[in-house]
Image (tube, helix red, strand yellow):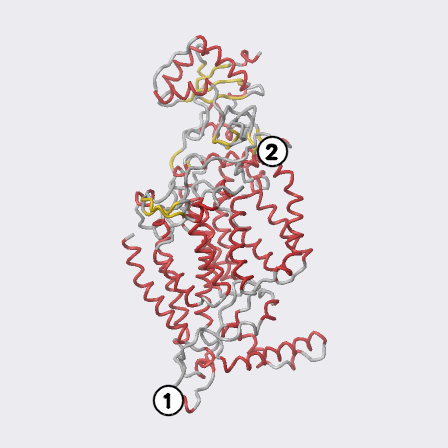
Amino acid sequence: MTWALGLSVPVVTCALALAWFFVRHDDGERRARADEEDGAAGGDHFRMQVVGYRTDRVDEVLARLDEQIAANDALLRGDVPVERTRPDVARTVAAAPAVGHPAALDDVEADTDEGADEDEDEDEDDEPPARRRWGWLDALVVAVYLGTALHVLSGLVGRTSTGYLSQGVQDHQAFEWYFGASAHNVATLSNPLFSDRQNFPDGVNLMANAAVTGLGIPLAPLTLVLGAQVTFFVVELLGLAGTAAAWYWFLRRRGLVRSAAAVGGWFTGFAPAMVSHANGHPNFVALFLIPVIIDRVLRLARGSSPGRDGVALGLLVTWQVFIGEEPLLLMALGMLVVGAVLVLRGRLDLRRLAPGLGVGAGLCLLLVAVPLWWQFAGRQSYTSIYHPPGGNDLAALWGRATRTIGADPWASAALSMNRTEENAFFGPALLLLVAVIAVVLIRRPVVQGLTALVVVACWLSLGEEIVVRGRPTGIPGLWAALDEMPVLENVLPTRFVMMAIPAIAGLLAIGIDAAVRAAPLTPSDTAEAQLPEWHPRVGGWLVTGAAVLALLPVLPTPLRVDERPAVPTFFTGDAWRDFTSGGSVLAVPPTDIVDARAFDWQLAADTLAFPIVEGYFVGPDGGADGGGQYGAARRPMSLWLYDVNAANAVIPATEAQRLQFVEDLRAWRTDAVVLPARPQTPALRDSLVTVLGPPQEVEDVLVWDVRELRR
């Protein structure tokens, strides 16, 4: 934290210089020759004016725009040859939005109103985003994103099957299992929304879990050929880099300069929250569809074809439902906040947007109706699940995340739920720079919307009561009014701050773009304004440098990777086939939220060829209210084995227990009870002997063949 605060000093300097540059720099005056009286008075090149056209030049610019529109209409009619179009008009109009203001972030806003009447250019709202061909510089930007993702996941390179992201507890193995379940369903033509490969025979409702079937099913061939571990690595790698690249594409489509889009895109892909969730939550890492969905909505708001773009929107949202419903919900809430601001500012016409949204919503509901019914009313479904208070500590907003350069992991742990939920941690330098950009450019509706989203997202994430460094303040948070609303009640409040990530990235990009575009476009413009060549670029240098400095404290470090427990050769070979006949395997102790090693056994044996008892998932708790819980409802034998393992001492079974345990094995339809080598093996073995008799030693495990008990 100390060096992060120290880094704020140059950021403050850059931010103040940026504010001076924007407020004092008059682009229109810079492009015009100095009048004689201005020279006599010492010049008026730096009048106090927010970035935009001078008032006395608005009519001139609008006249040139009208002239260019007329010329374009003539070209479309074929009345005027291309070579007769006035080049000076084309040049002026093409340069107008770049010189007078930064490019807008969204298609529904035309920002040429900076420094002029906001209603004078509403007709420009219909202009589509610029079509830009990608070149080698764009490929270089994406390569940087890919390199950063490889850096974050470097501990898994070459170790996908032997290492795991240990700070995610068992989430890494759980998502590998989900990929394996999707591949198994594809290979066996089974129900893609359900799997009985764990919690046998009751199974798991995949729609009611974060199963990422939207990626698991398309990537099933990769899983079947190379294994679920490789699929997990690919999804995480391309998820981080792809999310950054998708936002880069989105920002470039809004007309922002490359450096602005590159910085904004990088932050969306590698913000502390993204790196934290990379510890084992690919559903919060692979967010590459979010900017594409937003782009499609903006096309509809611009009046594009409700049929074509509405259908595309419906298909995109449907796909995102099967990748991650919670990120989709956060996206919708974020768009609602920004959209409300734009509507209030008259920059969003809901009547124009409604038809396309209706088409998209109708198609999406048609496609997901059955899956959603299955999620909430199908086999092994549940209505809601209890979460402990999960709001952000206020200090987490400007704190340091665990996986950032120079961070104190203990200080980070004190401000977060766990290592996979470090959802804020923006650092003081970044927040300061974003605040300066917001204040300087606050006249822009899109900046107002993004700023409102940052505030609302951070406020919601604080939970029911605001806490500062672990001390409750007694001040209620915004979440207190929403925590019992349907659907929202299942969201951890801390995750709402993730809505601020693209908003902060957008503000950074707008600030950089504004500074870069405030400079004359050509050397002749610089000479005309009698300015040194370096002078016009100073704004871009300042804000870009400030952004880089502000992002230094959030540069990620590689995720921690530990060795997995070795998979017994009993499962890597064919020995297990001699002990299974369509029933389940009981791993001793049974698989649960803290011990998911049996998932690796399944993946090693022909991708979930046999089911296991219990497991790590979310399912019904058996209560009358239909609530959910993590893991299976434990039977007596499972609880007994848990006690033996925890105590690491022999606990002989009574006769009554032995009879009950036999019933449990029948209910689980168990073929084999398998005990691998582990520190508690002697205690577990000797305790099981009192129930099942002596085991067989097969390769590197102890096995009890209990198929006879099922008859």
Seen at 51% across and 67% down, the residue is: 103
Q: CA distance from mark 2 to mark 1?
A: 79 Å
Q: Is residue 147 visible?
A: no
Using the image, determine if residue 331 lies above or below residue 220: below
Q: Nearer the viewer, residue 558 or 401?
A: 401
Q: Residue 66: horizontal and vertical position, in percent?
A: 62, 78
The residue to which callout 2 is attached is 377
Using the image, determine if residue 92 lies above or below residue 599: below
Mark 2 neighbour class, 10 Å CA radius: few under 14, some 14 to 19, many 20 or more:
some
Seen at 37% across and 63% down, the residue is: 546
Using the image, determine if residue 247 lies above or below residue 345: above
Mark 1 neighbour class, 10 Å CA radius: few under 14, some 14 to 19, many 20 or more:
few
The residue to which callout 1 is attached is 41
- Callout 1 secondary element: loop
Closer to the chain start, of discs 2 and 1, is 1
Farthest top residue? 655
Drawn side of residue 542 relative to residue 359, left or right: left
Using the image, determine if residue 38 lies above or below residue 276: below
Seen at 63% across and 42% down, the residue is: 368
